[in-house]
Amino acid sequence: MRLLSDFDGVWTHPREEARAQGAVLDGQLVAWMPEAQRAAAGELLAKARTEVRTAPERYGWAPGGRLSAFGDEDPFAEHSGLLYWLHLHAPSTPLAAAMADAVRAHGHESLESFGGWTHKEGVQQVEGARGPAILPAAADAGRALLGAGIEIVLVSNSGTDKLVRWFTHAGVPNTVHPERPAGALWLRGGARKFVLEAGASDPLSLGGLMIESRRPFYEEILREEQPQAVVGDVFSLDLALPLVLRRREPAWRDVRLFWLARDYASAMVRRQLETHAPEVEIVEDGLEGVAARLMRG
Ligand SMILES: [Mg+2]
């Protein structure tokens, strides 16, 4: 049995990291404005955040201008949604345009790469103040799964260095792909699950909610790993493609799909999964809930 697992939100609760990222992001955007415009800039960002929360199906993580995850799927996604809002409103809102220009003037190639930078800053701040924070219950569940002979390959957009540091700190045996010792997590960072294939589209429709499944980097890893189970907290990034494979290809018919519904889980996604994706097991009790289900068989 091989479990393919996401990292952020499965082994961690990202609330603090996301809060720190939001403070860096909004603070920096406002600070780059001329003093006379800073109050208005702060108000515009607050308004944009409200719109992202109201329409997460429209504003989310959109690398290259295409929606890869909805704005309410985890605490980081709202920040990406905010940057996408600025991108979409820049042509009609001078202050949004001024902020987008300031991002580029300060050496960031795009709003997207600025978002990546704020993410890294936020995570670093929290890690520096508090240390790595793998949830103790998740670390226990991971050790129990490994002890039961279940293989775990960790496939994350986070960098491999961070994964090594955090799991080692939590006392969970780990090794970096392609090393494959038994009894250790196999870490594959920098997975780029969010990258969509240029010029191609094959959306999964769940009750009209359209989720792009052409994720070439993730697909390559999935096909190489051939897991019997997949777990993640962001349905679009982690589970949409495995669900498409399960529905279309006999070799994937029995793969178990676990969606970790954390306290921030998207209500919109949950509704559609409950109605239109009976294959997806909604897990309320974290990685320990997944471990219990897998070890029960
Ligand atoms: Mg995640």
Image: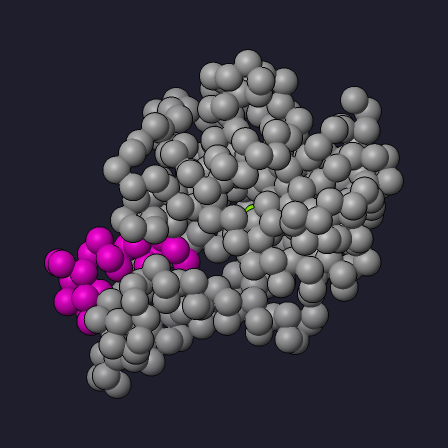
The answer to whether 112 appears left or right of 290 in the picture is left
Total numbered badges shown on the rendered structure:
0
Magenta-colored stretch includes residue 84: yes
Specify whether residue 27 is in view. yes
In the image, residue 178 sits, relative to residue 37, either above or below, namely above
Residue at 65%, 48% in the rendered image: 178
x, y percent for residue 228: 66, 27
Instruction: State the residue lying farthest toward the top.
Output: 250
Q: Main secondary structure of the magenta part?
A: helix
The answer to whether 237 appears left or right of 229 in the picture is left
Q: Which residues are magenta?
A: 79-98
Query: 127 or 59: which is nearer to us?
Result: 127
The quadrant of the picture occupied by the C terminus is top right
Residue at 21%, 71% in the rendered image: 101
In the image, residue 109 sits, relative to residue 263, either above or below, namely below
Query: 94 or 153: which is nearer to us?
Result: 153
Q: Quadrant of residue 287?
A: top right
Query: 88 or 199: which is nearer to us?
Result: 199
Query: 25 or 241: which is nearer to us?
Result: 241
Q: Quadrant of residue 182?
A: top right
Instruction: State the residue lying farthest toward the right.
Output: 147
